[in-house]
Amino acid sequence: MNGNLKKKLAWISLLYFAEGLPLGVVADLLPVYFRQHGVSLKAIGFMFFLTLPWAIKFLWSPLVDRFGERRAWISPCLAILAVSMLLLPLPDPSHPSTALWILLLLIPLASATQDIAIDAYSIGLISKGEEGIANGVRASFYRVALVVSGGATMFLVTPLGWRAVYILLALLFGLLALLLWKVPSVPVVHEPPREWARHLLKFLTRPGSLAVFLFILTYKLGDLVMGPMVKPFWVDRGMTPESIGAISTTGGVVMSICGALIGGWLTSRIGISRGLWILGLFQAVSNLGYAAVAHWNLAIPFLYGASLFESFSAGLGSAAFLSFLMRICDKDQAATQYALLSALFGVTRFFGGFSGIGVEQLGYAPFFLLTFFLALPCYILLPWVRGWIGETEYFLAPKDKKDQTCA
């Protein structure tokens, strides 16, 4: 690995650690926080509708393409997140007020804007042929951030209290804002509005676009529907915040990193289309582990096993999926195109808003089993996806093949 690539990967790791932290707060930390304060499963499920900014961020993504360098957007968003963490424990969590709901909405709004800038910056930074290893590192540190903000923090709740946890998160966001102010510049071409619109329309109307967009919408459907109810399931099994943290931060961190790095390496070796197929199946099967634990009321070691396998398989699937999204975007319109694609992916999160109702109506075991079947329909769309990737079929020899431009 040459020195230039090592520097790129160092910045990628820091950028995606920063990008993953807010989602860990929303998806993992807040459900435990509100459940411990007596908020109902239905209300916790509905809180995921507050992630709307992640789904509609494409509406303001052209601003990142049109104005200034993409790196200039990152640190201000992190500063907003730091202030939000300081304010979050002030309202009464057992009776969510309007002020608390507004604050909860501000977190994904700042995070979504940060995501636009980071993703576009990274696409400009990474060259073709570097997507596999870059997305392995990217998915690893994104995953580490998720378990730091949503898992490691559980160890601190009992000794320090919830307010101290939020203060520490605020300090971490503030530190990242300072560090990422120094990321190297990546040239941006600001197209005239008419040319920009023509370019975007061409991207959206390519042959097979409907099938590709449906694939993006459904590839992680099973995981995203199951996700909001995993932590409440642990709480309802009588597990303490420390125990929940242990699942996520011990073997979970190691397994997620291993999954992402192995997934990135395999994707670079067997190709993105094969990676989506093979690694995505591992991702789907992991949901069955939770279904088995819930159905047979298996002991805690089995719950640990299900969590470790989920962490590993999520890393595998994410590395292939992120490589796919990065490959099909044009560098000159990376902010808008990637925001559109990731917004499609983000729409799936709204199904998670009904997850609490699903558990209340079906029970944990049938609900987790249902999420496995929700992960399967996307594979019907893979032939159209392969056409956009532009790969010639190969196995274990991608360096002999020439990358083709697909956007």
Image: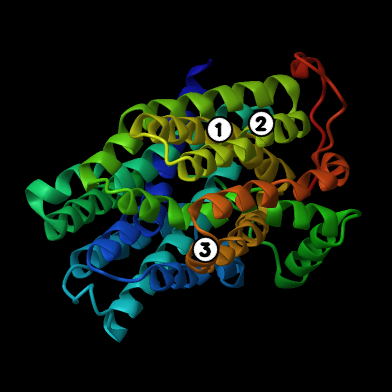
State how far apart marks 2 and 3 are (Cα): 25 Å
Residue at the spot of label 3 = 355
Label 2 near label 1: C-beta < 8 Å? yes
Determine the CA span between mark 1 and mark 2.
7 Å
Q: Position of residue 95 (x, y in %)?
A: 25, 80
Instruction: Give the color scheme: rainbow, by chain, secondary structure or one colour.
Output: rainbow
Q: Position of residue 48 (x, y in %)?
A: 46, 67
Q: Residues within 10 Å of mark 1 (few under 14, many from 20)?
A: many
Residue type at numbered disc 3: Ser
Q: Position of residue 38 (x, y in %)?
A: 25, 69
Question: Which mark sits nearer the N-terminus, 1 or 2?
Answer: 2
Q: CA distance from mark 1 to mark 3?
A: 21 Å
Image location (x, y in percent) of residue 205 = 86, 62
Vertical position of residue 317 compared to residue 331: above or below: above
Residue extending furthest toward the left:
159
Q: Earlier in the sequence, mark 2 or mark 3?
A: 2
What mark, if any, has residue 313 been given in the picture? 1
Count of labels in the image: 3
Q: Are marks 2 and 3 in contact (CB under 8 Å)?
A: no
Identify residue for label 2: 279
Q: Is residue 406 above or below residue 224?
A: above
Identified by mark 2, the residue type is Leu
Above or below 167: residue 299:
above
Regarding mark 3 in the picture, which secondary structure is present there?
helix
